[in-house]
Image: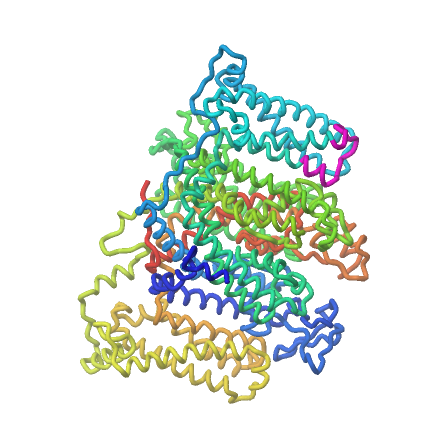
Amino acid sequence: RMMRVEGRYDTALTMFDDVIYNQREILGTALFVGVTTWTAVSSLYYLVERRSTDMIYCGAGYCPDIDTGLCNIDYWGFTNCTAAGCPPTDDDPEPCYNLYRSIPSASYYSLLNLFGEFPLIDQHSLGGKVVGTFVSIIAVAIFAIPTSIIGNGFEDIIYKRHEENLAAGNINDAPQHDSDLTLGFLATETTVRGRWFNFLHARSSSGSVLFDIFINILILGTVLSFMVDTISNLPGGVYMLLDIFEFLAVIVFTAEYLSRLWSSKEDPKYAGRFGYLKYMMTFQSIVDLLTVIPYWLEVAFTGRIVTPTGDTSTVSILVKSLRLLRLLRFERYTHAFTTFDDVISENIDILAVTGFSAVILWIFFAAILYFSERDNPDEEMAENYKTIPDAMWMTLLNLTGESPLAMYSTYGKIITGILGLAATGLFGIPIGVLGAGFETLVEERTEETPDEEEEEAENINPDFDFEIESYKFVNGIGSTAAKWFEISIFILIAVSVTVGIIQTVEGLEDAFGYIEWFAVIVFTIEYVIRFVGVPADPLFDDKGNWLVCRLRFLVSFYSIIDLLAIVPFYIAAAAPDSWVNDYDEMFRILRLLRLVKLDKYIPSITLIDDVIRLKRESLKIAGYAAITLWVIFAGLLYLTENKDYSNEIDNVPFEPTYSCDSDCTMSDRFQNFFDSMFYTGVHLTGDYPITTYTWPARFVNFFMVIAAVGVVSIPSGLLANGFMEIVASKSKMRKGELTAGMIAGDDWYEARLRGLKNVDPPPSRFGPTMDKWQIAVNEFLNGKEDGTWSTFATTARVFIFTVIILNVVAVLVESIPEVDSYVGNEKGNFFDNFEVFSVTIFAIEYILRLFCAPKNKEALYSSFIYATTFFGIVDFLSTAPWFVQQAVTALGWVDANSDAAMIFRIFRIFRMLQLEDFITAFSKLDNVFRASKDVMKATGLLALIIWVGCGALFYLFEENNPNFRTCDPSVPEETCYSFESTAECDMEFPGLCSQDAFTSVPNALYYTAVFLGGEWGVIDFTWPGRFVCLFLCVAGIAMYAIPIGILFDSFGVVLGIGEDEDEES
């Protein structure tokens, strides 16, 4: 019935066909990219997880929590958990099953991963974590292309209609926000009220400015006092001091409010009969009043001003939390929030269209999921969909791109898949409009004035020949030897960092030690040469004073990084079996700083200060808005969850942050305001690793999703945009350098292909008969020169297309245990015969393409060029694995029915890439990289440093976090969590204690890769780990995403999906 509004107030739903029509030329390509990526990832997950007992799920309601390690998975993929206490029955022959038992079943969980969601993050095997890391870093961005096209298509149509309404005069594009006071007004100094007006409102004297600063400091002090007051178990005297401070502060705020109210009559705006009332209705006056009235009401009702212990009653916490509203007083300086009505006014038609459509989608899908999941045998799933309001909460998260639950019914999987593929793009538009509109207004109202860069001296100091040669050599200038030395340093950095990561794995602590020795010696030599060449370095040149310039070098950023990368090794070598052993892990992690050495050659980290200076004005306003929203919503979540004893959570025994080893609830997560700030910070990135909230907290989260997420992301977006601007401005790549007819990413192949535009193929050395046959085969396989196809060639083309599709379907169907066991593995079974048939067809096609390549302009008239291009390699790989499999099985190296042989069978799925002959997409990947290589160097290095650096920090801080520790039931919980490290627990109880996450740097890199995609699969960190998490939330995720975003944009430009509209500064 809500859809009856369609055509009256809302037209968004009828836009869908317009979007499809307008994007028809590129949707086919984008969908091919998405489906191919999805199928390939599903196949890889199936390959590595189909035998994993950790992925066994018992969906039958009668099965208790069982140890899936006792289950057995047979050859066909059927799971038997009789030994674990869940035997099959006549009604349910397989009550437990592997979630990746077939490619179709793996496809749903792969789809969630490609949405950026990892609900099974801690259950993956080593192979699954490798695949998951690849998905997080690369595949997610590729898969996002079709969804983004649909979302962008809606935005384009909506904004077009918005512009039409503007042109017709239906919308006011320049809303004016009235000031609370008459701008520039000064009252007469002859009256006391006039002097007070000038002092408080006009701030016309230095004394009034100082008073304003005092009030601002007092505001920050009261906000901080509320945060500290929420910490339990502080000495009683601390609570008394906080209450006294609040009492004195409220007296000051009350006196200030009354004085402002009294003196406001001087302003002509409030000079009338109801002037006082009119002033009281202003935004700032309401904020001032709300921060003092509740306090005095509480004092009036309780008669208490000071309490010897912290008052944890709900009313008291509510009154105290209202102090946070005082942060809004800073609005008079930034005008950040008062721009929201401007944003809404400017985009009212867009918000009306998309907002109502989003509500329809929300309610519609919530109702469907309610019916499909309310009787789900999984208790957790049924509990979350027991009513439509409950379903609306989970559907809200689904529509924002979240998938906190995964064990849906078959219908539920289809519905949530549709949600992620299409509905998410439309639902996110109104949220994006608010955020983008706010950002646009902020940037328009602040003039960015980047600091002028100091020009580096171009000439090397000519007075020191030896220093000059050292400087040139170490920086790869001049000789071939210098360039190779620089390249070798690059390689050695990569190798030594990889070794450092591997050595954090248990049992491999001393692996590849000789490489570390060699690397340290080379890096030491490099440092000495660099130190010798300092006087010739323009960065440190001090007019010939060799001592001063070397001292400047020693304390420079690069020198410190170099020393931290080598000195710990010498300390460890000089003092073996000493205090150094206690800090062995820290010393190993310091080796990873060698990555930062690359910043010398590809500036990235050192550009961050330039970025902050470039965006400093916008960052001030957006940062204030983001911090204020963060603090206020953290207070609201603390208020609603501090006493939530009903929603149970897993044990969180880490002390002193949680200190709960049994019967834990949400109140253990939200013990104080600082805990709430951490979880709120994660939610404001759009991620919800926690969903078991009370209804009041769900309402708070609803407003976070609708309004705050878009605004809070602006500072990180400004940093990312500023970084791209700085890097692009320093890049030598410019559009003007492209020659006529070229597009972004073109290289030698495109240049030579254009050169053959009017050139006939060379004659064959075997005579005209061979020419005739080659031309005929070429026209048969690739069409005629004018783009037409003969009937026979068209039929053959359709046949090849059909065989490719059937091959993909065959791989998918064969992976289903029921089908595979029915067909059997006897020689000459259906799948084997079909494979022989397919290989024969593809092999003949490959040979014919090699044969006719001398007459194929796309192959540059060369069989070798065809064989080494994307198309030739794909055609070769479509048959080669089958021949390799036949060879290794005939030689007895691999059993035809073994898991090793399965790799060859699954490899057939990549025959999907042969469809590239029909839809151009992946063959342009090399063009994509070339189109973005200059900016990719700096941003890619920055992303790598963030990934490896944060992964190493998570490993250091979380490797022994008992929140991620699991012990056998025979080990008492309190004993399991009492050990300082998991290793100590395992020594006491051999084989019974294990750490689930952050067990090594490679393991931490897997989790960090997922985190950097915006998915916090685990969340209960130690406080140091929380700070790393918040860094990623504030800046790390945005900066890490820059290279992926650049690739996405370049992919669109190369394929013609979008135009490169970047303008030169």
Looking at the image, the residue that sits furthest to the front is 273
Q: Position of residue 410 (x, y in %)?
A: 58, 71
Q: Is residue 191 at all visible to an observer of this figure?
A: yes
Relative depth, front residue between 979 and 102: 102
- Compared with 599, 28 (above or below) is below
Question: Per the image, is 128 magenta?
Answer: no
Looking at the rendering, which quadrant does residue 549 occupy?
Answer: top left
Magenta-colored stretch includes residue 308: yes
Could you tell me residue 888's position as x and y percent?
51, 79
The residue shown at (45%, 78%) is 807
Where residue 436 appears, as percent x and y from the top left, is 44, 45
Q: Is residue 289 left or right of residue 778?
A: right
**Residue found at x 29% / y 59%:** 748
**Depth check, front residue: 988 or 131:** 131
Q: Position of residue 863 (x, y in %)?
A: 30, 72
The span shown in magenta is 301-320
Kindly tell me whether residue 592 is visible in this rendering: no
Choose top left, top right, bottom left or bottom right for residue 286.
top right
**In the picture provided, is 516 more to the left or to the right than 148?**
right
Whether residue 739 is situated above or below residue 345 in the rendered picture: below
Assign the C terminus to one quadrant of the image.
top left
**Which of the two residues, 471 or 307, is positioned nearer the viewer here?**
307
